Amino acid sequence: MLLSLPPLPLIRLQHPTTDSRLQLPPANGYFGCLLVTHAEPDGHAAALINALLDHGCVYFCCWGVACEQWHDGIDDRIVARGLGAPDEPCIMTTWHYDKPLEEAVWFLQNAAFPDETFEVDYLWQLELEICAGPSTN
């Protein structure tokens, strides 16, 4: 049985958004997030991942539909940005397929230890709702 912990602050994002800036609470430091997805990554996923990295996310837990693909996409963005070099602090990623959401939340709160270089100040649950982008017609 999992311990009962306070819920993670929940942020719901519609993706893609017509505004390239994410509407995330201000972060004055590094944070970890549980990315709850309801669809496979699309052509806008890299921009979303870059925005989360720019905002200070240093630990990504992926849960939901296609969580392994989201995880791999995050790893790809980390490497593409040169953040995965052996002499650099490590940004961590995990995926939690076929587990209840409560277990993924528990993992982020209790077992997700970022690289010792980063002092994590926040944990967020980001629920990503995939919606149709702006019409090009």
Image: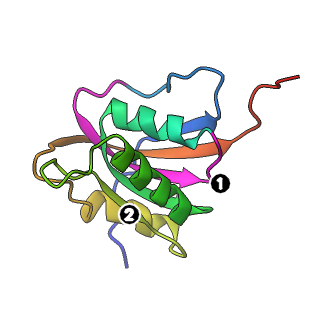
In magenta segment, residue 41:
yes
Q: Residues within 10 Å of mark 2 (few under 14, many from 20)?
A: many
Q: Is residue 107 above or below residue 37?
A: below
Which range is magenta? Answer: 26-43
Residue 16 at x, y percent in the picture: 65, 34
Going by the image, does 87 lie left or right of 110?
Answer: left
Report the residue at 29% width, 41% height from top. 31
Residue for badge 1 = 38
Going by the image, does 10 lie left or right of 84?
Answer: right
Residue 122 at x, y percent in the picture: 28, 40
Q: Is residue 119 above or below residue 74?
A: above
Is there any visible trace of residue 63 in the rendered image? yes
Q: Secondary structure at mark 1?
A: loop
Report the residue at 74% width, 31% height from top. 133
Front: mark 1 or 2: 2
Residue 45 at x, y percent in the picture: 56, 42
Q: Quadrant of residue 134?
A: top right
Residue for badge 2 = 94
Q: Quadrant of residue 50?
A: top left
Q: Secondary structure at mark 2?
A: strand
Q: Nearer the viewer, residue 4 or 30?
A: 30
Q: Quadrant of the C terminus?
A: top right
Is there CB contact under 8 Å for labels 1 and 2? no
